[in-house]
Amino acid sequence: MTFNPADLGWLVPYLILAITGMLLVLADAFYRGRDRTLLAGLALAGSVGSAIASIVLYRQLAPGETHGLFSDMLVADRTSYVLSAVFALTTAATVLISPAHQREHDWQMGEFYGVLLLASSGTVMLAQASNLITVFLGIETMSIGVYVMTAMRRKSRRSNEAAMKYFLIGAFATGFLVYGMALLYGAAGTMNLLRMQSALSSTQNPGLVIAGGFLLVVAFGFKVAAVPFHMWAPDAYEGAPTPVTAFMAAAVKSAAVAAMIRVFGTALGGDILPFGTLGWASPMVVIAAITITIGNVTAVRQDNIKRMLAYSSISHAGVLLVGICALGLGSPSAQSALIYYLIAYSVTTLGAFAVVAYVGSKGRERLLVDDWAGLASQHPGAALAMTICLLSFGGIPPTGGFFGKFYVFKSAMDAYNGQLLWLVVIGVVNSAISIYYYLRIVTAMYFRESSSPIATTRSAGIVFVIAMAPLLILELGIMPGWWLKLVG
Amino acid sequence: MNPQGSFLLPLLIALPLLGAIFVMCTPKSESSLHRGLGIAITTITFFVSLGIFKFFNPAGDGFQLVFDVEWIPGLGAHFKTGVDGISLFLVILTTFLMPITLIGTKSSVEKHAREFIAAMLVLEAGMLGAFVSLDIFLFYMFWEVMLIPMYLLIGIWGGQRRLYASIKFVIYTMLGSLLMLVAIFYVYVKAGAVLGTYTTDLEKLLTVALPYNAQVWCFGAFALAFAIKVPLFPLHTWLPDAHVEAPTAGSVILAGVMLKFGIYGFLRYAMPLFPHGAAVWAPALSVLAVIGIIYGAFVAFAQDDVKKLIAYSSVSHLGFCMLGILTLTTMGISGSIYAMLSHGLTTGGLFLGIGVLYERRHTRRLAEYGGIWKQMPVFAGMFLIITMGSAGLPALSGFIGEFLTIFGTFNAGCDPGNGIPCVVGQTEPVHHFIPAPHWLGALAATGVIFGAIYLLFMFHKVFFGKLDKTRNGNLPDLKRHELVAFIPIVIGIFLGGMFPRPLLKIMEPSVQKFIKDFDHRLNEPEWSDHAPHLYGQTPPPGVTALGAVADIQRNLDNVAKGAENAAAEMKRGTP
């Protein structure tokens, strides 16, 4: 590998996040006083700066133009910068909702911002990764940061339990990941994702490809919380502080899917599929179907909103897997469908968790559906924002969530001569089930009265996220054309 | 590019939507201001909708005032709106009922008046959008948009069991419409392959002939969505719950306009897109429609709750509409549309009337009333006309629609050239899929009699008899705003019953075109075993069907064949 300093220019979004992250860790050591708002300001500047850098670099590239960086370890193309901008902005939104939540629920730790930005740099690396090594590095940087953040509420038993579970299962999944990568390397003779496809199609060891593909399906199944590898997710989501949960659900999941787009779409997609009937796509379609169904059906039974959203995000992972299958099976529109879905899903998730962070105050977190009764009459703005987010989760037009689902399912219909129809039917029937539990929250907020005044965690940052998310969701749903041009 | 007057339809959708945003911006406490604004906005919308007639050519049979801009380029989705003789009056019905509902229920909503008005306005925008859209994606969007405000109307301003009723309403409708979405995907993908570009433009999609099996499945999916909305027996169970729990305004709009989307969906989407599917499903649908007519009437008769009674009467009346469109006769379809308009007026009026009673007595039980005529003579008179209109008394609007529908049913399958005579008004032989049309027509006709019985029975129990409940002693008669709401409805019922000709004349060209196109598509020569293609073109050879199902079938056949061969081989091998 040769080091070409000129390549660094294409890495500015990553570098900003990583350097700011390290600065924050240092700054925290020399910082006196309990209030960490200043650190939050620096973190916000870093993540927004990274997003701006991504946009600037995006505009310098023509559609379809790619630059391999550092001997093709990383890649610079339009897709990667769209994704890195999304991840950086997700980080910024997480930073915005954090300080007030920290203050209110008493987990003021300065390391948080440093760790957050370092984890976020991992997501941006995944957006640009084009080699199995960089995929692995990105996933680990991101995951380790999130394990730490999950445990940030040191005094909370749940937080500790969640972090422990998450860490053990995550470490376990990493084993699968490395093993799968090793097998693929053995079959292809290269780690490079762009060259892997042609190398694999002439391999002498199809058995290695099949086994490697299966192992990667398992590993990524853990990362995106697909059934049956989802057991950690509800506990981790519930135990982690709400801003961390938002980051986990939005950025971590999206970054894992971004890596899947490269690994399964580019390296293992298309012509490899002759191994395909036995290859990774066959377990993946089954996993996708089960994930959507189990996620939704279990969510129906939840009374805790964070757990409900955890199961809902599991079911969304299922939809994303449908898109990955479609991509691998050669649907031309699947990649832009997936990226659009990631954007809509991230915005919706951030909005929903911002409202969760907003509702509730010191000593009373108000995480049960019953706790939200009558929210609409006391905090109409928050209730309306939550309703729009939930409708977007449920896929009701005119929201971004609807169009995302529409587009992913449509690309699944395109793939493989319409053979994924059954998967689309399952996905769509599940949408109807999901409406039930999303509307349970709406029902509580609007149709029931509260017995006592609902105190909230108010800050400019939280209010900003709560106000922006619904607007963006509606904009995504009503004018999807602009976004499609961006990602297609 | 777009013809003159085409801006009217997008304007119709935009007006209530902007109105809703505007109402939400006004201060929360000014509830009379909100009501006034709501009435003003809907009235303006109504007058704007009358402007359609200025540009509408009554003799034209295609879509008019077509407005078309590209909306999502990557997907081929257009913002395309237009009206023809089928949708025109449904649009007018919607804009007409809206201000009347808001005026009539002016004093009944105390809680959150601002949100109530906003929800009603969004609902109106959604309904108008769904009636005028000519793009299947746009239609689906509006179709779902309607759902949420109605859910909120039932859930926030509803009765005791509103939580249950609202969620049942949403889940029922969603389940149906999501399966329709799958069928839309299918049509979209297959048509895109044939047309060369992906598009959701309805008129373009209609040029594609889909394989036979696919049509059967897709029609089934569409039919489920629309049959739930109609509602067709046995999918009607959400309706009584929704009606009973909904506030008066919600009930009026639900029965008056929203149910019509079921029938309209069949006419605009399901039947033209999948003629073969329609042919396969029509016998079952027509039988269910007739069961609905009679079942609805019987169950209505047994109700003690007035709202439930009217809800079941809707099941019965919409059965006529369903039967009418399946006859594929001009009479039947025009009659069906006419019956929808009449049902919108009369049932809307009946629900308003129940609202008037409920506001005074806070009960909907028939047994609680009796002898009200003496207390409320004006109201009783109005209510009588509306009841009679609903029961189908000649010279009132309900009569025309049901009469035409039944005639149309008798005509279905007539073929004068081959000695099967037609009833009056039909000279051409009719394509039809209704089993034993004469029997079904006769059975449906009994529904008119039963309808008269339960409606008169209801009227009798409420208004006649002794005034023996003390609490009914001093009920005030109609207030001014209620009177203002009832008078247009009563006038409409009279006019509709006495001068049906102008309306029918405007519908006729579109209905005839519908039938002609349907027959044309159905008779496309030898194509049903082929891949999708354009109508009128030689289909490419290939496999048919919903890929997976057919492929599995074929694979199984191959396996079976292989096994047979192997068995034969073995037999030959052994001496």
Image (tube, helix red, strand yellow):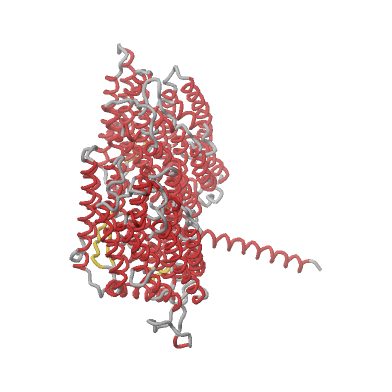
Q: Can residue B493 be seen by looking at this rendering?
A: yes
Is B278 drawn above or below residue B231 in the view shown?
A: below
Which residue shows up at 52% across the image and 58% down it?
Answer: B548
What is the quadrant of the N terminus of chain B in the image?
bottom left
The residue nearer to you, when weighing B532 against A406, is A406
The residue nearer to you, when weighing A447 against B208, is A447
Q: Quadrant of residue B374?
A: bottom left
What is the quadrant of the C terminus of chain B in the image?
bottom right
> Where's residue A208, x and y in %?
56, 42
Which residue occupies the extreme right position in the image? Answer: B575
Left or right for A177, reference A16: right
Q: Can residue B257 be seen by looking at this rendering?
A: no
> Where's residue B293, x and y in %?
47, 65
Q: Quadrant of residue A392?
A: top left
> Where's residue A161, x and y in %?
50, 23
Is A260 drawn above or below residue A27 in the view shown?
A: below
Label total for image = 0
The residue nearer to you, when weighing A114 against A471, is A471
> Where's residue A177, x and y in %?
50, 34
The residue nearer to you, when weighing A6 against A321, is A321
Left or right for B473, reference B483: right
